[in-house]
Amino acid sequence: MGIQAVRGTRDVLPGEIENWQRIEAIAREILARAAYQEIRTPILEYTELFQRGIGEATDVVGKEMYTFTDKGDRSLTLRPEGTAGVVRSLIENGLHTQGLQRLWYTGAMFRYENPQAGRQRQFHQLGVEVLGSGDVRADAEAIAIATDILQAIGLKDLTLQLNSIGNADDRQKYRTALVEFLTPFKDKLDPDSQTRLTKNPLRILDSKNAQTQAILENAPSVLDYLSSESKERFDRVQSLLQDLGISCNINPRLVRGLDYYTHTVFEIQSDNLGAQATVCAGGRYDGLVSQLGGPETPAIGWAMGLERLVILLQQLEQNRQSTVDFYVVSRGEKAEAQALKLAQLMRRNGFATELDMTGSAFGKQFKRADRSGAKACLILGDAEAENGTVQIKWLKSGEQSAIAQSELLNDIDRLRQQLSES
Ligand code: ATP
Ligand code: MG
C-alpha cells in the first residue's frame, strides 16, 4: 500500500474546496464590514506559550498537544488553538498600545485526539479576538458577528448557549462549592473527572459520562456565585442580545475548557451534527494578556470549527438536490421530443422536473437521475414513444410500471402522495 495521509488529517479536494472558499469569503466580508482585521501568526510556537496561556490542567495542554524538541533543543508545539498566538503577537508587536484591536484569523490547528466525524487531529478554525474592551457591547458584537456569519452561510437549527462564569473571584468561590459538593461522590465519578476534581473541577461539568452527569444534576449553579456586578454585567449582555434579535439558552453548566475565560462564555450548537455539535465556541478572557506578560487587557473572542461548517453545508446541498421530483430519461428522436413536452407538462402542474438532454445511453442517464436526488424517473424509449406510454420508476423502491402519457396526471393528488411517501 502506498503512503497514506496521517491519521486524523484529510485532503480537501476539488468539489469540496468550493464550500471552504465560500465560508471563508462570507466570513471575510462580514468581518471586514465590522472593522475586523486579519492577523496571521505562526503555526509553530514555543510550548511554554500554551502551557502558560491555556493551562496545564486542560485536556488541550495536558493530553492533546503535538509537542517536539527541534534540532536546537527547543520545545516547540504545533498550535492547538489560535488565541494564545494572537495574544503573544499583540504583546510582542505592541498592538495593545494602538487602541482597541479587532482581529480575526483562520488556519490549521493540531490536537492529538480521537478522530471521528467532525473531530480531526489537523483541523481548521476561523476565529476573532477583540482586545482592549471590557464593554458589554464587545461581548454582544462578537456574538452577533458569529451568528451573522453562520446565518449568511445558510445554516439552520442552531442554538446559542450562553453562560457567565463571573470574575476570577466568583469562579474561585464557585470552584470551592463545586468541589465540596462533588467530594462525597468522588468514587462514583468517571476517572477523568476524579483527576479534575483537584486539577480543574469546572471541567467536570463538561463530562460526557452519564453517571457523572446524573450526579451533577443537583450540583450548585455558577450563576448563584456571581457577585452583584458580575450578575448585572451578565444581565446587560443578555438584554443587548435581545435588542439585536438574537435568542439564547442560558446554560449554567456551560464552561469552557480553557483556563483563561471570565464572565461571558458561549457556544453555538447545531442539531445536525450528532455528538460533535458545537460549531462555534468562545468567551471573555480578561486575564490572558496579563498572564502572558502584557498589561491588563480585557478581551473576548470565539473560534469556529470549519470542518463542522463544511459538513453542515454538504448536508444542505444534499437536501437542496432532493427537491427534484421527477428526472426524465429518454432516448431516440421521437421519445426525446415527447420527453420535452412531458417535462413541461409536469412542471406546469407543479412538479419539480429535470430533463436529461444528453441523449447518452440509458445507463448513464439513470446514474445522473440518482445523483439528482429525484424521487422518480420518467422513462421514454422507442417503444413508449410509439404507443404513447411512459415508464415511471420509483428510485428508492425500484418499483416500475407503465402508464399512458395522457393518464399520468389523471390523479394528481395520488401522484403527490406517492412522491411524499417515497
Ligand atoms: P470539543 O468539546 O468539541 O472538543 P473544544 O471545547 O475542545 O471542543 P474549542 O477549543 O473551543 O473546542 O474550539 C472551538 C471550535 O473548534 C469547536 O467548537 C469546534 O467547532 C472546533 N474544534 C475543536 N477541536 C476540533 C477538532 N479536533 N476537530 C475539528 N474541529 C474542532
Ligand atoms: Mg476538545
Image: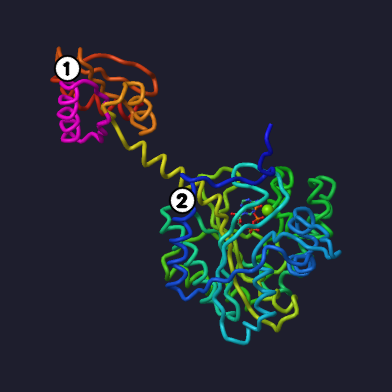
Q: Against 274, is 325 above or below?
A: above
Judged left or right of residue 360, residue 151 is right
Q: Are marks 1 and 2 in contact (CB under 8 Å)?
A: no
Q: Secondary structure at mark 2?
A: helix
Q: Which kind of residue does numbered mark 1 sit on?
A: Ala
**Residue closer to the observer: 66 or 348:** 66
* In front of the other: 325 or 419: 325
Q: Secondary structure at mark 1?
A: helix
Question: In this picture, is 256 found above or below 98?
Answer: above
Name the amino acid type tagged 2. Answer: Asn
Quadrant containing ligand 1: bottom right
Q: Which residues are magenta?
A: 329-358
What numbered label is drawn on residue 341?
none
- How crowded is the residue under tag 2: few (<14 C-alpha within 10 Å), some, or many (20+)? some
Applied colour scheme:
rainbow
Task: Give the camera-side residue of 67 and 408.
Answer: 67
Image mark for residue 385: 1
Q: Residue at x 68, y 80 (%)?
A: 91
| Quarter of image, res 390 | top left
Which quadrant of the figure contains the C terminus?
top left
Is the C-beta of the residue carrying label 2 under 8 Å from the nearest atom of ligand 1? Answer: no
